[in-house]
Image: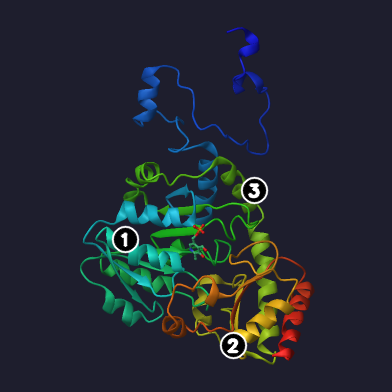
């Protein structure tokens, strides 16, 4: 092979050694070069620190995981290919056939399916309860219960789990508490502070904040971490370097974004409460929200960027609002820069029966807003356009 065929120059021969890049490089390489069989054996056997194959680990995932570990003040953190992959990793690494899990009945629909369908297929049973009813949670616990699974803020009615009380309950029964913190983000709540053992985030949402990656985070205790890396690699739950790099960039502005979006969300909730045609507004920052006291204790000043409301005119009113609020895109996700809306009945909760939806308080007229970082006046003006459209219903 002559030198013109050497199409793969070694990076270490290209980088000037006297300086370091200020922004983190993106290590897209799926594989790393080993010096000799002894080193390969030591790296793969875990006796030497280093990367070999990106499904087992890569620098961009490790940088992001370390940043998230610090944010959540936890012993261990890892990045998975999606929020669902992070949840799958906790199920596959911590639970075994015969184990039982108590789960909130207001979990994200796919998470409910993970427990009622996929985990059940593996012999892991679960009981769904109203997580805000501590007596019901306690009643659902048995000697086989290994974990309680909650969302810090539920979707779409924004109920707030009392994490300290749930952690005490879990620990008293020899179980652990897993908090899905996606709707809060560490800028609003750090569940470890309140005793949660496991924290999971869909980084896809608020933490990345730009609607351009799918990623998940799992944080947990060192004592229970042993199986997590092998589960991530063997079940193929790993993350992509470029996505990790983007999420790292998004994280840099998370605190500012959440602060601004929370201010806007409170203003939006106050506008909606005073508007004709709005039957109910759900936002933990409002004093009459059923969990306002818990939210104040756990969150402090900011209550997050999600606001839901139910229009008294039902589905017709929701259609009219969505059409008239033409500056607010209908996007069934959340946590990005601009304000978006979703309609839980036709999107996140469409798999539920009408009776189940009605038990959870989700109606045809329920709309979930993910409030963005625009100026407050722009958010309120865009909402006012939607509310004006209700006149026609
Ligand atoms: C609360 C919550 N948890 C977990 C997930 C799953 O995350 P991902 O879409 O990144 O797999 C979602 C997705 O919408 C979510 O809303």
Q: Do residues under tags 3 and 2 come within 8 Å of each other at their CB atoms?
A: no
Q: Residues within 10 Å of mark 3 (few under 14, many from 20)?
A: some
Q: Which quarter of the picture shows residue 314?
A: bottom right
- Residue 58 lies, in percent from the top left, at 50, 37
| Eye-nearest disc, 3 or 1 | 1
Where does label 3 land, which residue?
A: 249
Relative to 293, residue 184 above or below: above
Residue 383 in the figure: left or right of residue 52: right
In the depicted view, which residue is nearer to us: 286 or 101? Answer: 101
Residue at 58% x, 65% y is: 333
Mark 3 vs mark 2: which is more N-terminal?
A: 3
Q: Is residue 17 above or below residue 95?
A: above
Give the residue at mark 1. Answer: 119
Q: Is residue 48 left or right of residue 326?
A: left
User: Of helix, strand and loop, which one carries label 3?
Assistant: helix
Outermost residue, top side: 2
- Name the element at disc 1: helix
How far apart are the alpha carbons under marks 3 and 2? 40 Å
Q: Position of residue 350 (x, y in %)?
A: 49, 73
Which numbered mark, 3 or 2, is in the foreground of this view? 2
Where residue 347 sits in the image (x, y, percent)?
54, 71
Q: Which mark is residue 328?
A: none
Which mark is first along the chain, 1 or 3? Answer: 1
CA gap, disc 3 and disc 1: 34 Å
Choose top left, top right, bottom left or bottom right for residue 242: top right
Q: Residue at x 51, y 58 (%)?
A: 202
**Is the residue at mark 2 in contact range of ligand 1, meaning its CB lies under 8 Å from it?**
no
Tag shown at residue 314: 2
255 or 149: nearer the eye? 149
Q: Disc 2 vs disc 1: which is toward the camera?
A: 2
Against 271, residue 202 (above or below) is above
């Amino acid at each position: 092979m002559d030198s013109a065929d050497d199409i793969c120059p070694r990076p270490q021969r290209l980088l000037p050694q006297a300086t370091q890049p200020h922004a983190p490089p993106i290590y897209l390489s799926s594989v790393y070069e080993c010096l000799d069989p002894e080193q390969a054996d030591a790296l793969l056997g875990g006796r030497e620190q280093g990367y070999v194959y990106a499904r087992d680990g890569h620098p961009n995932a490790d940088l992001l995981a370390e940043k998230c570990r610090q944010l959540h003040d936890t012993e261990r953190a890892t990045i998975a290919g999606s929020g669902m992959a992070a949840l799958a990793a906790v199920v596959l690494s911590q639970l075994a056939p015969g184990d039982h899990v108590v789960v909130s009945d207001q979990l994200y629909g796919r998470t409910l399916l993970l427990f009622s369908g996929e985990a059940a297929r593996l012999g892991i049973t679960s009981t769904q309860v109203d997580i805000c009813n501590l007596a019901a949670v306690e009643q659902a616990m048995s000697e086989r219960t290994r974990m309680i699974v909650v969302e810090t803020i539920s979707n779409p009615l924004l109920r707030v789990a009392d994490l300290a009380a749930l952690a005490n309950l879990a620990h008293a029964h020899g179980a652990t508490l897993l908090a899905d913190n996606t709707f809060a983000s560490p800028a609003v709540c750090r569940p470890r502070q309140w005793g949660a053992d496991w924290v999971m985030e869909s980084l896809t949402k608020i933490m990345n904040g730009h609607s351009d990656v799918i990623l998940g985070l799992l944080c947990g205790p060192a004592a229970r971490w042993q199986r997590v890396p092998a589960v991530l690699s063997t079940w193929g739950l790993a993350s992509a370097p470029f996505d990790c790099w983007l999420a790292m960039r998004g994280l840099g502005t998370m605190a500012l974004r959440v602060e601004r979006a929370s201010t806007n969300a409170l203003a939006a909730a106050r506008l909606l409460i005073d508007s004709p045609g709005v039957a109910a507004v759900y936002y933990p920052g409002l004093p009459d929200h059923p969990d306002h006291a818990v939210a104040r204790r756990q969150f402090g000043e900011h209550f997050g960027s999600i606001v839901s409301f139910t229009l008294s005119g039902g589905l017709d009113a929701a259609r009219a609002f969505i059409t008239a609020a033409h500056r607010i895109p209908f996007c069934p996700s959340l946590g990005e820069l601009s304000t978006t809306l979703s309609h839980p009945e036709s999107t996140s909760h469409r798999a539920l029966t009408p009776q189940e939806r009605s038990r959870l308080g989700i109606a045809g007229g329920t709309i979930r807003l993910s409030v963005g970082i625009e100026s407050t006046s722009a958010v309120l003006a865009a909402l006012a356009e939607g509310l004006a459209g209700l006149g026609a219903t």
